[in-house]
Amino acid sequence: MSGAPIPKAHVEVFGVFAKPVKKVEADEDGKLSIDLPIGTYEVTASYPAFKSVKKRIEVQEPTNQTVTFLLNVAVGGPTVEIFPPDSKLVCLEIKKRGADHAPSGPGCVDQQFVEYGTPVMFSVNGKVVSGVSVRPDKPTYLYLWMDNQSDETEFHYFCCGKIFWNHVVDVYDAQGNRVPSKIEQAAQAGNYLLESCTCSGYRPVPPHTLMVVDSGDLLEDFQLAPDRYVIFAAKPSATTVDLHTSLQITVP
């Protein structure tokens, strides 16, 4: 990785859920200037023999904004890594109250994906990667996954019978607008909602283990009309967010 600019790098700009807004090339210095109206966009930078990179950009006002893309050389062509090779999927039935139960049998690993959906891993905190999946038969019921890539046991703090999704994810509608949580809506109206737990605890995640650690209905924290939505890792203070992956759901 030299940090040198890539001349004529390919750049695609998408509105969320929309067709490409622009499809252009960088100049000889690897730079590009484009004008975009206010909104949320997904920008992809790519070049042959390099791994493409996506970022989410929020244009909030007509001022200049600089976004840097770092493209790494692809070994043997483009690759997409969902789970690190040294992480083991653990079969575990999550209990909101009482002890968790570990199913047995050779098919329990496959059954995890059937029951909980395949997770989209999109948030890194040190050596702990988190992500979400959607329950196949209920598109607003999400599962929170943790992938502990460290050599020490990590712990997930859980609230009995409740997961506060507004602290975990950001939700955007089909027009690219961020959907405020119920707590944010109440505060805007001059009211305040209290978040509380009847009981709580810590769920251990062993080293190099991928597992479901929590679950709950997104509608408990967000008021969502029938439509399509994009879910990202929550980054409330960021205006530019790396978009490695996102989860898309449809509320019927």
Image: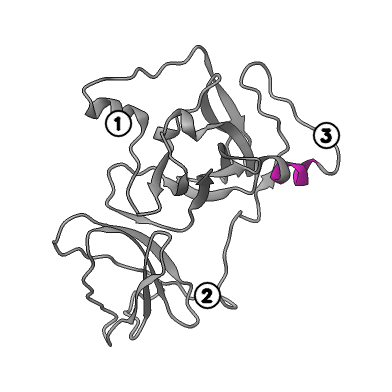
Q: Position of residue 99 (x, y in %)?
A: 68, 19
The kind of secondary structure the magenta stretch mainly shows is helix
Above-or-below relation of 48 to 175: below
Query: Does the magenta segment cover residue 110?
Result: yes
Q: Which of marks 3 and 2 is in front?
A: 3
SS category of the residue bearing label 1: helix
Measured Cα–Cα span from mark 3 to mark 1: 42 Å
Q: Which residue does the numbered mark 2 point to in the structure image? A: 74
Instruction: First in sequence, mark 3 or 1: give its number.
Output: 3
Most extreme residue toward the top, as rendered?
198
Q: For mark 3, does the 10 Å Cα neighbourhood hold few (<14), some (14 to 19), or many (20 or more) residues?
A: few
State the mark number for residue 184. 1
Q: Where is residue 27 in the image (x, y as percent from the top left)?
A: 27, 85
Q: Position of residue 63 (x, y in %)?
A: 13, 61
Measured Cα–Cα span from mark 3 to mark 2: 39 Å
> Is residue 150 in view?
no
Q: Nearer the viewer, mark 3 or mark 1?
A: 1
Q: Where is residue 124 in the image (x, y as percent from the top left)?
A: 46, 47
x 56%, y 75%: residue: 75
Q: For mark 2, does the 10 Å Cα neighbourhood hold few (<14), some (14 to 19), or many (20 or more) residues?
A: few
Query: Does the magenta segment cover residue 36?
Result: no
Query: Does residue 114 appear to the left or right of 72 in the view shown?
Result: right
Q: Which residue does the numbered mark 3 point to in the structure image? A: 104
The range drawn in magenta is: 108-113
x 66%, y 23%: residue: 95
Query: Does residue 14 appear to the left or right of 189 in the view shown?
Result: right
Say which amino acid is labelled 3.
Answer: Ser
x 53%, y 30%: residue: 156
SS category of the residue bearing label 2: loop
> Is residue 85 in view?
yes
